[in-house]
Amino acid sequence: MPVNYSTEQTIPSDRTVRLLDTTLRDGEQAPGVSLSPDEKVEIARGLERAGVAVIEAGSACTGAGERQAISRVTDLELDATVTSFCRGLEHDIDLALECDVDGVHIVVPASDRHVEGKVGTSREDNLEATAELVEYATDHDLWVEVIGEDGSRADLDYLEELMATALDAGADRTCFADTVGHTGPERTAEAVSRLADLGPVSAHTHDDLGLGVTNAITAVSAGADLVHCTVNGLGERAGNVALEEVAIALSHVYDVETLELEELYDLAQLVSRATGVQLPPNKAVIGENAFTHESGIHTDGTLKDDKMYEPYAPETVGRERRLALGKHTGRAGVKATLEEHGVEAGDDEISEIATRVTELGDRGRRVTDADLLAIAEDVTGDDRERVVELLDLTATSGGAVPTASIRLAVDGEERVASGTGSGPVDAAVSAVREALGSQADAELESYRVNAVTGGTDAVVTVEVTMARDDRSVTVARSEADITRASVEAMVDALDRLLASENQPLTPADD
Ligand SMILES: CC(=O)SCCNC(=O)CCNC(=O)[C@H](O)C(C)(C)COP(=O)(O)OP(=O)(O)OC[C@H]1O[C@@H](n2cnc3c(N)ncnc32)[C@H](O)[C@@H]1OP(=O)(O)O
């Protein structure tokens, strides 16, 4: 159901809106990002699973490697239309044809700054060249979208003339481009509604002013029916408008469905892994904190009614809700988290544990599951025997094969093992798994390293989350030695997981 309380919806729910993804072209233009053909193929498959209508696979003019990558995507024979970016040059269209794409985006200058200052032509010659290029592309059976580059800074009368020329020459659609993310919703609405009167129009917005989604939604309400986006908002400078944000905004606010929303989180992680650009924790839909609650009032409210502090269920976009502990934790959050770990405590004990969690958070620390459980044991007096304990660790690197040997106490019995790996941490983790056998059957859900202090002698904090069956435990360890911190965190997490299976803590009396 749309959530607008107004009866005047600017985008009615029966509007057909489709999304074009340009992660493989504009997204890849983000500094430092370069996708291999295999990565492009994997991302294109993910985009297809999500139901993206058009995939801009790259710029064929960039070089042989790029053309090979685009060809690999066209070879997939996806349902989505696969396209290439082309400058206003016949040669670029020829290169796109070599990749067997379904269509092209012919990017022609629209503002005087681009017409005269960049391409060095005149308004009149630009009109003529645009018509010729469109005819050339359509003669080769290509689907054609003409993008008026820097359209938001163009004289709108000229932009309208340029786009009318493109449509008259046979272009399938035009595109309003806020190339430098310079404009706001009013000008977007004016420009898009003028172009929509001519024929089908797309919107291409950037986030330099943080107005990417606003302008995209405004463009749709002004008549655009295809929105250019990138996964995670990757792109030039501050990025393009994020695919996941446009999709959820259209769905949640206007009841207009564009994608298989539950695919969005996997897609976000896939793109993050391939590009090396981490997901910002506070980003809508994909950020780690988007469905995580720490503060006591929010956690309590969410436990009473899961819609209390969330606009939509995390499962909608392929995610799960999480409770976190820290400075702002209250009793309800402590009780719920302890229950997740099979630990019961009385009301007074819960209050005491909550106070100590807050105190730990006050010291600027993130409070992990292991911290909570240690506090709970202290408060309830439930001492437990460790199942696994690290006794000794030696790791070497710099030679041909990084190796590590490890000595563990497992249920009071000493075990020694060694392992090799891609680096000392990997080798030490192999050794731990070797020593523990099936007891180490736990998935490493996340592994994060953070240098707490500067310099080469920095103290690093390693935080791991490990899961076994349907339980997960987060542990953080700080050390100057990253290998030791990693292994200690992992062994402690395994110890917690195994302890809860073998020796559940007994409920404490009130
Ligand atoms: C808004 C956007 O996202 S634009 C897309 C940006 N994408 C890219 O740049 C793709 C990656 N780029 C590349 O691989 C290279 O820049 C290439 C292969 C396209 C061109 O490389 P080079 O020939 O060395 O040119 P260079 O990069 O120095 O300059 C760009 C040229 O394209 C021209 N150009 C730029 N936009 C257009 C256009 N819309 N129509 C025609 N020509 C254009 C420029 O005028 C310049 O030509 P000039 O050298 O004759 O002055």
Image (cartoon, rainbow, N blue to C red):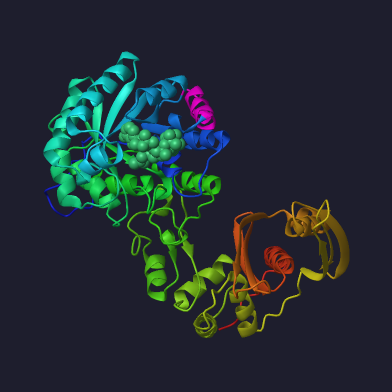
Q: Is residue 339 magenta?
A: no
Residue drawn at (72%, 68%) of the image? 488
On screen, residue 383 above or below 13: below
**Residue 100, horizontal then vertical, whole percent:** 45, 20
On screen, residue 484 above or below 217: below
Q: Is residue 71 magenta?
A: yes
Residue drawn at (55%, 48%) of the image? 273
On screen, residue 182 above or below 488: above
Question: Which secondary structure type mostly characterizes the magenta part of the structure?
Answer: helix
Depth order, front residue of 205/225 = 205
Depth order, front residue of 178/91 = 91
**Residue 268, horizontal then vertical, whole percent:** 47, 47
The answer to whether residue 410 is left or right of residue 470 is: right
Quadrant housing residue 50 = top left
Q: Which residues are magenta?
A: 64-77
Q: Which residue extends farthest top?
A: 139
* Quarter of the render that holds ligand 1: top left
Depth order, front residue of 389/386 = 389
In which quadrant will I find the C terminus? Answer: bottom right
Quadrant housing residue 446 = bottom right
